[in-house]
Image (spheres, grey):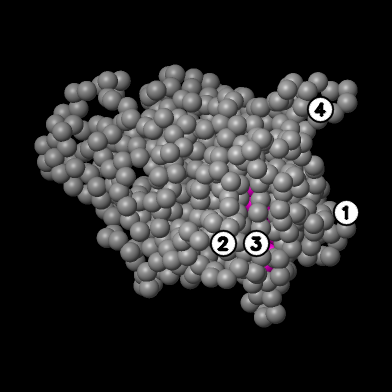
Amino acid sequence: GITRHYKFDVRLKNVTRLCKTKTIVTVNGKFPGPRVVAREGDRLVVKVVNHVSNNVSFHWHGIKQLQSGWADGPAYITQCPIQTGQSYVYNFTITGQRGTLWWHAHISWMRATLYGPLIIYPQHNSSYPFAKPHKEVPIIFGEWWNANTEAVINQALVTGAGPNVSDSYTINGLPGPLYNCSAKDTFKLKVKPGKTYMLRIINAALNDDLFFRIANHTMTVVEADASYVKPFETDTILISSGQTTNVLLKTHHNPQQTTFLMAARPYFAGQGTFDNSTIAGILMYHDDHHNLPSNNISIKNLPIPTLPAINSTSFVANFTNKFRALASEKFPANVPRSVDKHFFFTVGLGSNPCPKNQTCQGPNNSSKFAASVNNVSMILPTTALLQSYFFKKSNGVYTSDFPSVPLVPFNYTGTPPNNTNVSNGTKVVVLPFNTSVELVMQDTSILGAESHPLHLHGYNFYVVGQGFGNFDPRKDPANYNLVDPVERNTVGVPSGGWVAIRFLADNPGAWFMHCHFDVHLSWGLRMAWIVLDGELPNQKLLPPPADLPMC
Ligand code: C2O
């Protein structure tokens, strides 16, 4: 591989959306941010210089960071933030991965405007396990607030209430024709008849899983989270926050019209408020040689593709069950067969009592929203976990007693247990190198059933099972798929159900795991694994770079 250099200048920029101009934090003045492109085996060197007053840090979502945990990016987990006027060079090699990933800021809600595609092409002597598409197009969904997003979350954390929902969704930064004065800010995908396009779809929305469909067209799913899957055809996809999905779109040979709408809107099974608006873009046929029907339908009158009901958990279960690893000779599924350590995590929302002398607007008006894993709501430390671990200064920073089962036994189908009250802590699980892990995550649904997109840093995992209701340790494992389970970095814990994953802890470091909804992340739905070094030189975390930011 080669070394590719990028420079990320973090600076302010005025951007107008929905008729309002606001100042946002950008990378290089671009919104969404620049595309980062590499090939499998390449080294990426990204120099970040912070010219704004906010602290920043950047995460390369889905990159395994073998031995290079210092470049992973979540603030207070692998590094302290890059402060005003400071810089930090993210330096890592892309080993054994190719496909669509993305990068985003990983501190507070800064990723609302700091995000972009990270595209990894196969090695020169390698190709896709499907015919090379005519063209490849990144489609990145985002979420836009008219207000300053840092103010939105900070206000919510102070009052204990839910934050204000976004004002629109965006495709490649554009809200599209269904929003106020945004017809000119519409994403247009120009295609030729009879060709195959690969859409590299990324869900960068802060707090929403999205359904996506293109009117009168079907898509063939070929990749999920930069892992090839057995191709399957669908008219609608569900993409959870943080996930990426590559689809092939075959255009019609003789289209009956030249423009079609594409649309996305959220899947939301819980209670409470969310942005239930629809983002639309345009698929536009053009051709220099054929005569296409003239575009005599105005965009306003184009039918919006029919999407599943907002709370259609049955569609989601059915759709997610279709994902199977390609599991070919060239791209085998290395599913751990035996398990060294079993973990059972409850994930969900809860509440914290309101502090004295404060009025809270959270659940019951007398509490603050909280979210937890096994009833532990994680407080971020004031110095990075990885630094404290590596320099053997963990005392007072974290404890190694993260519970492997819930603190309060959980029964989804019985009377909901009175375990909405969470305890705060900075607890980690310490794993010896090469531990084979099975983790079952159960949605607690205490404040309403809701799907949680759980993201693990530093690894891909295999999704070996999922179901509704209580996970049953005596019955459910018999139905695990250990042959071709999909390999991902982010999985939806089903609303009112559970998901089982397996991974081999062969990458030393401190690895964050959290709900990819920023609101739940802020409320504490997060924990960390510390994976110890192995014996061999290539099984050890390398020392930190000299410019690693300090707290
Ligand atoms: Cu894409 Cu820790 O996040």
Residue bearing mark 4: 354
| Magenta span includes 462 | no
The CB of the residue at mark 1 lies under 8 Å from ligand 1: no
Disc 3: which residue: 342
Q: Position of residue 534 (x, y in %)?
A: 69, 75
- Secondary structure category for the residue under label 1: loop
User: What's the residue at 68%, 31% (across, down)?
Assistant: 153
Q: CA distance from mark 4 to mark 2?
A: 38 Å
Cα distance in 3D space between marks 3 and 2: 9 Å
**Residue 160 image-quadrant placement:** top right
Q: Nearer the viewer, mark 3 or mark 2?
A: 3
The percent coordinates of residue 277 (x first, y second) are: 46, 25
Of the numbered discs 1 and 3, the one sitting upstream in the chain is: 3
Q: Is mark 4 within 8 Å of ligand 1?
A: no
Q: Is residue 16 visible?
A: no
User: Magenta span covers which residues?
Assistant: 508-516
Q: Which residue is mark 1?
A: 396
Q: What is the x, y in percent for residue 309?
A: 41, 30
Which of labels 1 and 4 is toward the front? 4
Please name the predominant secondary structure of the magenta segment in the image: strand
Characterize the local packing of mark 3: few (<14), some (14-19) or many (20 or more) Cα atoms within 10 angstroms.
few
Q: Disc 1, disc 4: CB below 8 Å?
A: no
Q: Does residue 249 appear in the picture of this structure?
A: yes
